Amino acid sequence: MIDDRKNKRPTVIIIDDDHSVREALKGLFESVGLSAETHGSVKEFIAADDPEKAGCIVLDIRLPGQSGLEFQEALAQSNLPRSVVLISAHVDVPMAVRAMKAGAIDVLTKPVREQDLLEAVARAIANDAARREERNSKTAAQLRYTSLTERERQILTLVIAGKLNKQIAAELQLAEPTVKLHRGHMMRKMKAASVADLVKIAGGLS
C-alpha cells in the first residue's frame, strides 16, 4: 500500500461552498498535473484533513459557518500553518490587508483569471515546501542534539560562544586533548563541517 504522506506530489485543497466552482478549479489544477481535492466547508475539510499532506489550500473567504478568513487566521496561529490562497467574489481593501497580515499568499477576486490563480498556487506550493523542509531540518538537528553527551553539549555551547579549545579546557577543567576529542565527536554527531555550520545548526534548535 502506498503511504500518501510519502507522496511528494503536492495537493491543492479547494474549500468553496459553490459546487460548480469547486469542480471547475479541480479540473483546472488537474489539467496542469496537480492533485486536487474539494470540500464544501471548513468543517468538512477539518474532518478529512491530513496536515502532513504537502501542497496548499485555495479558500473562499465567504463560507457558511466559520468564514475562510477566520479559518486562515486560525491556521496561521496553529502548530502546522498552511499556505493559503484566498478567493472571493467581493474583496475590499481591509479584508485583503487582514488576510495578507495573517500570511495569505494572495487574495484574488472571482471570477479568477486562471493564470493568476495558477501562479498564486505555484507560489503557495513553493512556500509550503520550504516551510516543511525547514521543519524537517529543525527536527533532524534536535534529534542529533539529543544524541550528545552532557560534556559534548557543554562544549557545543562554548564553541558557538567563540571559545578556543584552550579556553574551553580551562573553563571545564579538562586537558586540551580531551576537549579536542569531545569536540570532534560533537561536530560529527551534529554533522557540522565548521564552527559556522555549528552556529547555524544550533540557531535552529530553539
Image: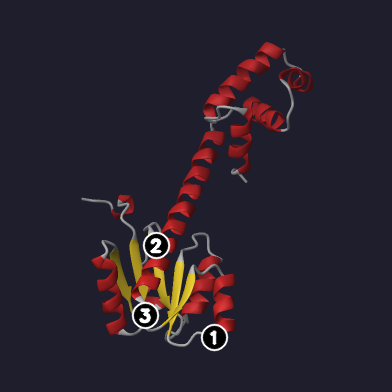
Q: CA distance from mark 3 to mark 1?
A: 19 Å
Mark linked to residue 122: 2
Q: Nearer the viewer, mark 2 or mark 3?
A: 2
Amino acid tagged 3? Asp
Q: In the rendered image of this protein, does residue 92 appear above or below residue 193?
A: below
Amino acid tagged 2? Ala
Mark linked to residue 41: none
Q: Secondary structure at mark 1?
A: loop
Q: CA distance from mark 2 to mark 3?
A: 19 Å
Mark linked to residue 92: 1
Judged left or right of residue 174, residue 53 is left
Q: In the rendered image of this protein, does residue 91 appear above or below residue 166?
A: below
Q: In the rendered image of this protein, does residue 74 appear above or below residue 187?
A: below
Q: From this viewpoint, is residue 47 visible?
A: no
Amino acid tagged 1? Asp
Residue 177, how many percent across, how many down? 67, 11
Nearest the eye: 98 or 5: 98
Mark linked to residue 16: 3
Could you say which quadrant of the image residue 51 lies in? Answer: bottom left
Judged left or right of residue 174, residue 201 is left
The image's colour scheme reads secondary structure
- Residue at image coords 40%, 66%: 119
Q: Secondary structure at mark 2?
A: helix
Residue 80, how many percent across, how many down? 49, 60
Give whichever of discs 2 and 1 has the lower sequence position: 1
Residue 138, how many percent across, how many down? 53, 44
